[in-house]
Image (cartoon, rainbow, N blue to C red):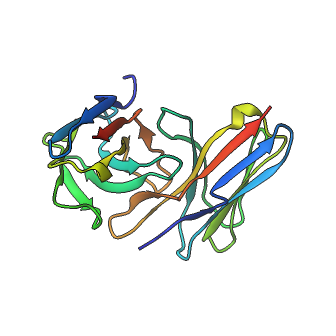
Amino acid sequence: TQLLEQSPQFLSIQEGENLTVYCNSSSVFSSLQWYRQEPGEGPVLLVTVVTGGEVKKLKRLTFQFGDARKDSSLHITAAQPGDTGLYLCAGYGGATNKLIFGTGTLLAVQP
Amino acid sequence: DTGVSQDPRHKITKRGQNVTFRCDPISEHNRLYWYRQTLGQGPEFLTYFQNEAQLEKSRLLSDRFSAERPKGSFSTLEIQRTEQGDSAMYLCASSLRGSENTEAFFGQGTRLTVV
């Protein structure tokens, strides 16, 4: 069974601070996705990383895919209250290639 | 098309009752997923369909849960003899079968409370 473990589980920081969220697995994924979920809404895709070692930037968010394609990280620079939400990594795996999600990281950015 | 639609948004039921949720995916999407989510946690995979075929059902799912997608369009998730532990958000997502980079689009979910 492929599992995606995220750390930390919960993060509370002040506006302007930097943070990193990690997504780890013992299995190789051909790609990993990052989603963000706000209260009362479904997750929304932020980015997909495909190549081992790849780095993608989305404004103040930087995503990296590990060289071995077993892990990924999300770094947020100068966090803002609008970044508050549940961050989820996800990947396709298993015998039927279903989409599975990580355990989640709940981020709260205080003004 | 306005996206993935789920109905109802909220459901309160008494323990032991049956409940049914509906999901209408984006019209051209052939994959449809059901997930269960508790507060602050990642969505837990329940089952998924490609067109009308149910490709996989979670081994963690009891026989009280069943899902259908009879014509490859909308889907229903039924929970029989509900228990308090079934209280959660039930999310539906749809996607186009394609590469493993395919984006999944989610509905707003159905929040179930079993009292």
Would you place residue B5 above or below residue B114 in this image?
above
Camera sees residue B23:
no
Quarter holding the C terminus of chain A is top right
Question: Residue visible at 26% across and 51% down?
Answer: B50
Q: Nearer the viewer, residue B24 or B66?
A: B66
Question: Residue visible at 77% across and 38% down?
Answer: A59
Residue A85: quarter of image: top right
Residue at the top extreme?
A: B2
Residue B91: quarter of image: top left
Side of B101 where B67 appears, left or right: left
Q: Residue A91 in the image: state x and y as whole percent.
A: 50, 59
Q: Nearer the viewer, residue B82 or A42?
A: B82
Q: Nearer the viewer, residue A1 or A28?
A: A1
Q: Nearer the viewer, residue B12 or A71?
A: B12
Q: Residue B42 in the image: state x and y as whole percent.
A: 49, 53
Would you place residue B49 above or below residue A8 in this image?
above
Camera sees residue B4:
yes
Side of A92 where B110 appears, left or right: left
Would you place residue A78 above or below residue A29 in this image?
above
Residue B5: quarter of image: top left
Q: Residue A22 in the image: state x and y as whole percent.
A: 68, 61
Question: Residue visible at 37% across and 49% down?
Answer: B36
> What is the tally of numbered marks visible in this picture?
0
Side of A101 where B80 appears, left or right: left
Quarter holding the N terminus of chain A is bottom left
Question: Residue visible at 15% across and 49% down?
Answer: B81
